[in-house]
Amino acid sequence: MARRYAVYKGLQKPLIFKGFKGKFIYWGLASILAGLVFGALTMSLVNMWLGAIVLIGSMVGGLFYTAGKQKGGLHDKSRAKSIYILNHYGRKDLI
């Protein structure tokens, strides 16, 4: 007789970390790393205080941008308001 095991139902849910879901975790990580790089370059080339402002500003700005894009959903796509006709050459003609 076959045994029955409980199936974990949470496998299809996106990964969530600190409020960011799915691909936006990587976007947040990329904005933090980009802020560190831009801040370090500014600190070394221009001024330490300006570099600190650039570092904090780019990190916070990138995280706010990521949080704003996340509100569109994980599968946010651009939606065209026009009608496109695909001709036999593979080009799209706008009507």
Image: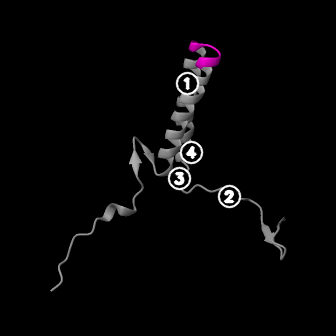
Residue found at the far front of this picture: 44
The residue that disc 4 covers is 69
At 66% from the left and 55% from the top, the residue drawn is: 78
Identify the residue shown where x is 51% and y is 34%.
32
Q: Amino acid at mark 1?
A: Leu
Q: Residues within 10 Å of mark 1 (few under 14, many from 20)?
A: many
Q: Which mark is residue 33?
A: none
- Numbered range of the magenta stretch: 43-49
Residue beneath disc 2 = 79
Mark 3 belongs to which amino acid? Gly
Residue farthest to the left, as pictured: 1
Badges 2 and 4: C-beta atoms under 8 Å apart? no
What kind of element bears circle 4? helix
Q: CA distance from mark 3 to mark 2?
A: 14 Å
Q: Amino acid at mark 2?
A: Arg
**Cα–Cα gap, marks 4 and 1:** 21 Å
